[in-house]
């Protein structure tokens, strides 16, 4: 009977995940750069039938290994080379992630805790949002989390035979993380384990005992298990790199390593940010989980936790959180999804805190309600105001730069009810405060989580397509109009959109700017530039025979035609 109940719950999670993550995957174009970058790699694999080499513009692309591109290739073979095909793998990842959280949660405590963790993860803004995108991180994070989880299980298992399976599974998933995004997948785990051992050593000194740390080291340094771990890790994570070297592509391997180093040392391609960028993004973007987790950062938070496995898992998760946040704070390149691995430990800590409240072991701290209400109200008001943006954007125009003023010339077409998404978010947090004050915590959290879920679902489906009109829609439409045309396209700013949305073929590849701008062309060449006075003057001086086609919403479009031959 118990097994039947578990099967039913998991089936319901699968259905709920499909309902949440599948609809609307294709309602908005892929966004430059990351979404289009990965999708274009998959498209070129399909077109060239070269599934071993990651390519962009039909040239080797060393920044990422191929696993995620392979997932997108499989999806695009079924659904076509389009937005849905590019994003479908992450929707599947979302369903699997919810199942993973539920099952780990129930093993740590019980079914209720598994459901609380699953709900909090699904109802937090960024975790939900990323499952409806075509970026690489959802799978990457899941693999690291599973690799870490099985290693935690290994350190706690007394059955020696079972430990070999757990070591192999840990290495397998960490290897898949490396094959998805590179060595940082193993680095995050290694740093977490290293810090864990240091903390255990400090705790042992405080207790004047060596038993716990020696037991951990002994279990983790059995030479057979170490050999097994690194064999599996090297085979799964490294076989693609080895194949590249065997095929004579050693330079790709070198360029890949140099790229990883550059991400740490420089603000790659303009992706800079202030020092505490990731802390701010996580606090706001992972709400409400981020706010609910704040009380768990107290040193004495686990003093009443009697479940030793839960205590140990909690310690691993808080270390994992800090490793991710500090690591990507040090990294010079600041992109919001770089710190998305922190969503797993953060939602776990939030779930633990909520469970303690439900059981009467903790009370909801009054100070938690203030940032919760503040963030929800600010975001809700902003979302409610967006549909009216065209009516007050003229107030912003004088303070915007020239390119942004061009973007703001776009107009959107709202259905008229989109403002309700913001109202729902605000209403949800108000009801949360009201019922939590009455100590009716279950009702309070139902209102909080459901309003957050409705908000992010509706915003992605109805608001995002309209916001795109102010950013990239005009340029994407230009590329789509060039499909099936035998031509060159050159974007004067970094963009992967021309390749994917013009569906360029190998014969239209040309990286020689001098030839495209001044050479004797054999086919038309279209130029796309940001429509600022400086950019236009520079371009027209360097390409005097280019003919302007039109400008729209911050972009200018030109063409050079081949000269007629006698």
Image (spheres, rainbow, N blue to C red):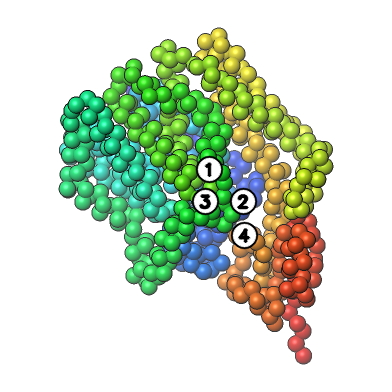
Check contact, mark 1 vs mark 3: CB within 8 A.
no
The one nearer the camera, 191 or 436, is 191
Q: Who comes first in sequence, dot 4 or dot 3?
A: 3
Real-space Cα separation, disc 2 to disc 1, in angstroms: 25 Å
Instruction: Indicate the secondary structure of the residue bearing disc 1.
Output: loop
Is residue 74 visible to us here?
no
Q: Position of residue 265 (x, y in %)?
A: 47, 55
- For label 3, the residue is 333
Q: Who comes first in sequence, dot 4 or dot 2?
A: 2
| Residue beneath the point at 17% across and 30% down | 211
The one nearer the camera, 485 or 354, is 354
- For label 4, the residue is 495
Which quadrant would the N terminus be assigned to in this image? Answer: top left
Q: Is residue 509 above or below residue 565?
A: above
Q: Who comes first in sequence, dot 2 or dot 3?
A: 2
The one nearer the camera, 143 or 330, is 330
Q: Position of residue 364 (x, y in %)?
A: 49, 16
Q: Who comes first in sequence, dot 1 or dot 3?
A: 1
- For label 1, the residue is 275
Is 29 placed left or right of 153 in the picture? right
Real-space Cα separation, disc 4 to disc 1, in angstroms: 26 Å
Q: Who comes first in sequence, dot 4 or dot 1?
A: 1
Q: Point out which mark residue 31 bears.
A: 2
Q: Who comes first in sequence, dot 2 or dot 1?
A: 2
Disc 2 packing (10 Å; few <14; some 14–19; many ≥20): many
Which label sits in the foreground, 4 or 2? 4
Is residue 109 visible to us here?
yes
Instruction: Indicate the secondary structure of the residue bearing disc 4.
Output: loop
Which quadrant would the C terminus be assigned to in this image? Answer: bottom right
Instruction: Indicate the secondary structure of the residue bearing disc 2.
Output: loop
């Amino acid at each position: 009977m118990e097994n039947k109940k578990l099967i039913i719950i998991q089936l319901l999670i699968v259905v709920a995940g499909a309902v949440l993550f599948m609809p609307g995957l294709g309602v908005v174009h892929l966004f430059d750069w990351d979404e289009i970058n990965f999708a274009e790699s998959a498209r070129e694999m399909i077109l060239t039938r070269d599934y071993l080499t990651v390519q962009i513009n039909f040239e080797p692309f060393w920044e990422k290994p191929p696993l995620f591109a392979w997932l997108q290739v499989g999806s695009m073979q079924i659904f076509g080379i389009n937005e849905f095909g590019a994003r479908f793998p992450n929707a599947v990842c979302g369903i699997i992630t919810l199942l993973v959280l539920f099952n780990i949660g129930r093993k740590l405590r019980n079914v209720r805790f598994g459901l609380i963790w699953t709900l909090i993860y699904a109802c937090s803004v960024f975790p939900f949002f990323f499952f409806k995108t075509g970026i690489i991180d959802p799978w990457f994070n899941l693999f690291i989390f599973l690799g870490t989880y099985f290693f935690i299980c290994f350190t706690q298992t007394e059955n020696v035979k079972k430990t070999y399976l757990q070591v192999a599974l840990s290495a397998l998933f960490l290897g898949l993380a490396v094959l998805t995004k590179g060595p940082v997948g193993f680095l995050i785990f290694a740093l977490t384990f290293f810090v864990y051992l240091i903390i255990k050593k400090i705790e042992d000194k405080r207790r004047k005992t060596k038993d716990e740390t020696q037991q951990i080291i002994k279990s983790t340094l059995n030479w057979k298990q170490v050999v097994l771990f690194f064999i599996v890790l090297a085979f799964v994570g490294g076989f693609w790199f080895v194949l590249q070297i065997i095929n004579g592509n050693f330079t790709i391997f070198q360029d890949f390593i140099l790229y990883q180093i550059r991400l740490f040392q420089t603000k790659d391609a303009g992706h800079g940010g202030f020092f505490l960028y990731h802390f701010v993004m996580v606090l706001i973007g992972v709400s409400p989980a981020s706010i609910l987790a704040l009380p768990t950062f107290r040193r004495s938070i686990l003093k009443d936790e009697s479940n030793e496995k839960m205590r140990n898992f909690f310690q691993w998760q808080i270390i994992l959180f800090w490793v991710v946040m500090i690591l990507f704070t040090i990294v010079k390149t600041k992109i919001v999804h770089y710190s998305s691995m922190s969503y797993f430990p953060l939602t776990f800590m939030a779930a633990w805190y909520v469970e303690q409240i439900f059981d009467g072991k903790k009370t909801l701290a009054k100070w938690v309600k203030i940032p919760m209400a503040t963030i929800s109200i600010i975001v809700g008001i902003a979302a409610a105001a967006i549909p009216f943006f065209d009516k007050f954007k003229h107030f912003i125009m004088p303070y915007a730069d020239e390119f942004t003023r061009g973007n703001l010339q776009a107009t959107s077409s709202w259905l008229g009810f989109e403002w309700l998404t913001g109202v729902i978010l605000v209403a949800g947090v108000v009801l949360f405060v009201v019922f939590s004050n009455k100590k009716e915590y279950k009702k309070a959290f139902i209102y909080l989580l459901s309003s957050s879920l409705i908000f992010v679902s509706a915003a992605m489906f109805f608001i995002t397509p309209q916001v795109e009109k102010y950013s990239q829609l005009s340029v994407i439409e230009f590329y789509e109009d060039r499909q099936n045309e035998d031509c060159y396209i050159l974007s004067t700013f970094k963009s992967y959109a021309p390749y994917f949305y013009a569906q360029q073929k190998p014969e239209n590849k040309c990286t020689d700017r001098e030839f495209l701008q001044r050479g004797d062309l054999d086919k038309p060449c279209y130029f796309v530039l940001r429509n600022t006075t400086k950019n236009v003057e520079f371009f027209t001086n360097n390409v005097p025979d280019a003919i302007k086609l039109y400008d729209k919403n911050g972009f200018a479009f030109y063409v050079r035609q081949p000269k007629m031959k006698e």
